[in-house]
């Protein structure tokens, strides 16, 4: 077993999964892959089982129904924590996240508790998004920062690497959000404890195959979730822990003390 686990939640990703597996296992770093499938009607889970039967580093976690991104990741995190993984990553299964970036995350994670992949470090790195979607994402980042105080350029992104102890410090059963606000909530719970968080630049490419999971319900959940996080943190817009939080674009860093 390798030290790194890449968790990929899937729902109707059959057309992407084989190519994704090939890309991940062609990397110059050794990782395990956990496919968390929400009973995809297109047979993604069955294909994942076939791939796992041929490759000992592929694992599959089947869930009975489509129950949201947050629940899928929490199930994957719990699975990972039951085993001896040190680096636990989130990655989309539709190639919007480039598997080639995984080594950069692992390198940054040597000096961090959480590594965030940022689409907005030193400029905008998004391909094939309409202007309305880009404005929504950028506006969400500013909204999150203004209410919670988190200094990160891309708090809603879903390409991440957690150190084992960072996930252990979170009561996963208490995670309430389920859409993209899940990403905000997880980062906030680590940030407000004063753990080290680093951003690394990524290029995000809108999916070519399949359809986006974005919805109005997901947006509304994120709007109220940040207020809940602010109250959980005692109305503080800063961490309560003792370490330094850093937002890093490449080799440049900006520090914020708790």
Image: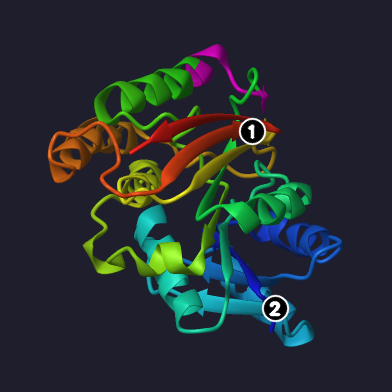
- Please tell me which residue is depicted at 25% across the width and 35% down the height of the picture: 226
Q: Secondary structure at mark 1?
A: loop
Q: Which residues are magenta?
A: 125-134
Quarter assignment of residue 54: bottom right
Q: Give the left or right position of residue 2, taking residue 174 as reference.
A: right
- Residue 168 lies, in percent from the top left, at 38, 70
Quarter assignment of residue 19: bottom right
- Disc 2 packing (10 Å; few <14; some 14–19; many ≥20): some
- Residue 234 lies, in percent from the top left, at 12, 40
- Whichever of labels 1 and 2 marks the residue nearer the N terminus, that label is 2
Position above or below: 239 against 29: above
Position above or below: 119 against 130: below
Residue 43 in view of the camera: no
The residue identified by callout 1 is: 206
- Please tell me which residue is depicted at 61% across the width and 26% down the height of the picture: 121
- Disc 1 packing (10 Å; few <14; some 14–19; many ≥20): some
Q: Give the left or right position of residue 31, taking residue 164 as reference.
A: right
The residue identified by callout 2 is: 2
Is 252 magenta? The answer is: no
Q: Secondary structure at mark 2?
A: loop
- Residue 8 lies, in percent from the top left, at 58, 61
Position above or below: 104 against 152: below
């Amino acid at each position: 077993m390798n030290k790194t686990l890449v968790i990929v939640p899937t729902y109707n990703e059959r057309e992407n999964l084989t190519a994704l597996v090939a890309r991940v296992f062609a990397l110059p770093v050794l990782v395990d892959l956990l496919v968390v499938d929400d009973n995809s009607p297109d047979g993604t889970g069955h294909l994942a089982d076939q791939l796992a039967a041929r490759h000992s580093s592929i694992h599959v976690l089947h869930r009975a129904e489509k129950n949201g991104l947050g629940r899928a990741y929490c199930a994957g995190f719990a699975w990972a924590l039951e085993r001896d993984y040190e680096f636990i990553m989130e990655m989309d299964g539709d190639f919007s996240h480039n598997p080639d970036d995984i080594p950069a995350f692992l390198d940054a994670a040597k000096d961090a508790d959480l590594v965030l992949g940022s689409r907005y470090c030193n400029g905008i790195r998004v391909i094939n998004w309409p202007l309305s979607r880009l404005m929504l994402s950028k506006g969400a980042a500013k909204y999150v920062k203004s209410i919670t105080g988190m200094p990160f350029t891309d708090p809603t992104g879903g390409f991440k690497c957690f150190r084992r102890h960072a996930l252990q410090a979170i009561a996963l059963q208490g995670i309430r959000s389920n859409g993209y606000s899940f990403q905000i909530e997880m980062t906030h719970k680590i940030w407000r404890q004063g753990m080290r968080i680093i951003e690394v630049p990524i290029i995000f490419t809108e999916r070519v195959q399949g359809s986006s999971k974005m919805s109005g319900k997901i947006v509304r959940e994120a709007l109220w979730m940040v207020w809940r996080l602010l109250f959980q943190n005692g109305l503080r817009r800063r961490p309560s822990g003792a370490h330094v939080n850093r937002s890093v674009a490449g080799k440049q860093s900006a520090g914020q003390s708790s």
